[in-house]
Amino acid sequence: MNDTPLHFRSVFISDLHLGTRDSQAEHLLDFIRNVECEYLYLVGDIIDGWGLKRSWNWSQHQSDVLQKILRKARKGTKVYYVIGNHDEFLRPFLPMMMGDTITLAEEKIHSGANGRHYLVVHGDMFDAVTMTKKWVAHLGDRCYLLLLRLNRPINRVRRWFGKYHYWSLSRAAKQNVKQAVSFITDYEEVLSSHARERGFEGVICGHIHHAEIRSINGIEYLNCGDWVESCTAIIETHEGEFFIYEHHQNR
């Protein structure tokens, strides 16, 4: 990224999965260092409690990410941490303040510069598998991790043949398996319907690792994506426009 910081009104990032070896903390740190904003939303699955229970994989880059976020908060950025399913160990303590700098909550309301009001929520509460069949969710998480592990050797082979653009087997599987595509569509529609029923004009979420901005029955649906493979964020400009930032395309 450019050494000159980029200035935006709001930045939304989700699914960092800090504490796992698949977290792209080095790229995330590069992004956070080069972005200044008034509001920073951490939209769930920031610290991966599931992963830390299985094995401890905490790197210096992951510590640096947290330190950088805390430094931004101390310098005036309003930081909101919305809890997800992988960091659900924090839910019993909600609502909570980390010092006077970071607010932790189940959900937040974001007032956009465009005059619209957005529900900010991780989204796991709208995933029937996560809520009713947790053992299936844990099994699916392990299968997803296996696909992530295969991404590394696959991309090494691709580089041997001169293909340097990052390609993700796990993302391709999600996009091409009919049942997975159906799950994503259902998730987006259910979450958008919930936002509409509560009187919001839009919803900003994470959870399914699929960055998206689209209108669903008049509701603006925005998904942050993740920082284990796609390395994406939702950005709000000072003019009130939203767009998907892709770190792999900008570094």
Image (tube, rainbow, N blue to C red):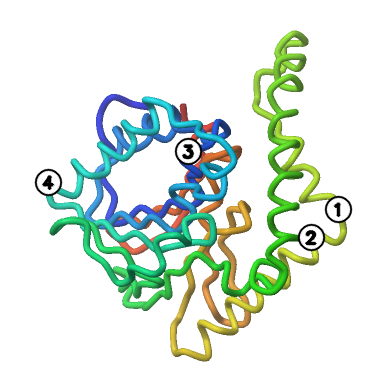
| Disc 4 crowd, CA 10 A, few/some/many (<14, 14-19, 20+) | few
- The quadrant where residue 1 appears: top left
In this view, the residue in front, 85 or 216, is 85
The residue singled out by tag 2 in the image is: 181
Is residue 154 placed above or below 216 in the rendered structure?
A: above
The residue that appears at 66% across and 76% down in the rendered structure is 189
Q: Earlier in the sequence, mark 4 or mark 3?
A: 3
Circles 4 and 3 in contact, beta carbons < 8 Å: no
Vertical arrangement, residue 241 with respect to residue 52, above or below = below
Which label's residue is closer to the chain start, 3 or 1? 3
Residue occupied by mark 4: 75
Residue at image position (76%, 44%) is 143
According to the picture, the residue beneath numbered tag 1 turns out to be 177
Q: Amino acid at mark 2?
A: Val
Indicate the amino acid at tag 4. Answer: Lys
Residue that mark 3 sits on: 19
Q: CA distance from mark 2 to mark 4?
A: 41 Å
Label 3: state its secondary structure.
Answer: loop
**180 in relation to 230, above or below:** below
Label 2 neighbour load within 10 Å: few <14, some 14-19, many 20+: some
